[in-house]
Image (spheres, rainbow, N blue to C red):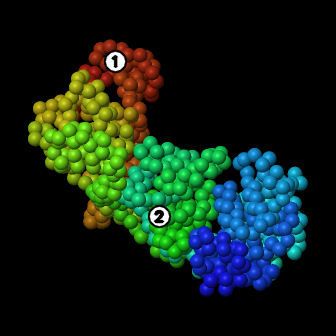
Amino acid sequence: MTFEQLGVNQSIRKAIEELGFAYPMPIQEAVIPFLLQNPDNLIALAQTGTGKTAAYGIPVLQSITEISNNPSVLILSPTRELCLQIADDLTDFSKYMPGIHVVPVYGGTGMEQQIRALRHGVQIIVATPGRLIDLKNRGVANLENVRNIVLDEADEMLNMGFQDSINEIMESLPADCRKLLFSATMSREVEQVAKGYLGDYKEIVVGSRNEGAENVNHIYYLVHAKDKYLALKRVVDYYPKIFAIIFCRTKLETQEVADKLIKDGYNAESLHGDLSQPQRDQTMQKFRQHTVQLLVATDVAARGLDVDDLTHVINYGMPDDIESYTHRSGRTGRAGKNGTSISIIHTKEKFKVKNVEKVIGKEFVDGTLPTPQEICTKQLYKAMDEIMKMDVDEEQISPFMEEINRHFEYVDKEDVIKKIVSMTFGRFLSYYADAPEIEKPSTKRVKNEERRLKGLKEPREVEAGYERLFINLGKDNGFYPGECMQFLNKHLGGRQKVGHIDLYGKFAYIEIPQEDAENVMATINGTFYRGIEVRCNPSEDKSQAPATTRRQRGRDEKKDYARLPKKERSPKRENNRDRGQRGNADFRREVFGGDKKRSDQKRGRRGAARQQPEVEDWRQFFDASDGIVVGGDRVKAKKKPRGGSKQLRGEEPDFSEEGWARRK
């Protein structure tokens, strides 16, 4: 089918043929005849890049039969960039229609020029809602004669919070004004506007509601959040001829990513709402002219952009809603061409991929990031291709050839080739020679036993001449290699030589020269580190090493208890009623094999792990009001116990001596 068969008049056909329009797109075949023949309201759903602007632009232009100074067509768009783009397209379509003036009005710039253009006379206004209301309130924008209003990207306008502005504009229009809504997705907000203002309307859907673009491949790379930018660089480097938009969630993130890319030597620019309108216009002009290779943008700033030959759309993280992803991916794969939508996500965003797959009806490919070898190979071919395709102007270079030949007379041809290739290829070789490894996080749930075994894996072989010692301090205690060295040097009174250190959560293995091992254990055993009493022993001694987790030890103890004969098992604990009848003291003695004093002593030992006891604190448990006698000397009492003065037997124990508790 041709545009002539659709009913498009000669003036518009001549203009669009010069623009390269040969045959109408599916959305145009469905919408143009309907709008030319029916005055009904319309909702049209089609993917971005399918020709929606021409689908409504051609019929509304052809509907203008009388030229007046007041507008008869009003088109609303969510962003300034889309507003300018629509105005440019309609101006091109109406090239051979004398008397048609299209005026874009938008915020972010002075309104004096826009006011003059409106007062000069206009037939079509393309506007953002906020600026249009300002001009209407000033009495400059007269909407009394509007016969057609178009809401382009209606879902995005409503998502951006223009609901009240749209309501105010709708109430200012004549009752017989035809209302046309064009969108890529049909959200609840669009349906509410349709019910409130469109009344009876025709719905035209090309494809399926909220369907993804047909010619777009969807790939995601799963990385840790800290590796997102490194992954982005790898994707960009792997496609030397990439021409892409990189979507970010916030204006701050957009600027940060763009700054990093520019600093690393990439041809990139940012596009977001904090830029002035001249800056945004200049950026878009450079991007459309392909002088900028990577455009880092927010969803709002890039909404509705029509850029030719866009090869990729890169999502620097998944958007919060599916409609935004649909609009993002629709920037590529336009006009029948193929495109690729790449999403760089972390594990917490994986569910968003599944949700998008269900709605757009397409499956994402779980991609594997290219290796440094693959990237360097691609870039090498690019460098060689650029050298071979370089045009040489013989006339300009001939005067310098004698000097060039003399300079390279004794240089081997192979060396010259290496140097030339390295000039363009060397940056990638130097970066990827020491490029950090990007690990792909696992999304599978690890069983508890696997986690336990992983955390308690056997340490490696001991280095010759060293002995491995176990110490009950680990990462959870802030015991890292630096702290370990400081701790040892502090207590040993000098620089202690240390080999490998294997750190775990609650403990660590340190390798000490064999001749120093005994001294290290004797010195640091019983000391305190951040309130924790230190235990250190050879790693082969499993008596103190946490060979299993606390939960596993509990299970093993229960199993051992169950294997005992009934006569050897401890008596069962009594219920609460019996416990209350017999008294807590008796119950404690029977069940735990001790009295309250012993229990208090246990609690005292546990408290020692939190606070190191002061020297001679032991005396407070024996001192009397008039003092006690230790080794013939009377010591001042702190507390008065029952029974008066106590005479201790023997010499005063030296608690600083190693192994005092075992001394007889």
Picture mark count: 2
Place of residue 442 in the rendered image (x, y in percent of width and height, measured from the top left): 37, 62
Q: Nearer the viewer, mark 2 or mark 1?
A: 2
Q: Residue furthest left?
A: 465
- The residue positioned 19% from the left and 31% from the top of the image is 497
Mark 1, residues whose alpha carbon is within 10 Å: few (<14), some, or many (≥20)? some
Q: Which mark is residue 59?
A: none
Q: Say which residue label 2 marks.
A: 311
Counting residues from the start of the chain, the first of labels 2 and 1 encountered is 2
Q: Secondary structure at mark 2?
A: loop
Q: In this rendered view, identify the residue nearer to me: 329 or 250.
A: 329
For residue 408, above or below residue 526:
below
Residue 183 visible from this viewpoint: no
- The residue positioned 22% from the left and 25% from the top of the image is 495
Mark 2 → mark 1, Cα distance in angstroms: 93 Å
Q: Which mark is residue 629?
A: 1
Q: Is residue 469 left or right of residue 322?
A: left
Place of residue 529 in the rendered image (x, y in percent of width and height, measured from the top left): 35, 33
Query: Which three-letter amino acid code belongs to the residue tagged 2?
Result: Thr
On-image quarter of the C terminus: top left
For residue 525, above or below residue 433:
above
Q: Is residue 231 left or right of residue 29?
A: left
Q: Is residue 189 left or right of residue 261?
A: right
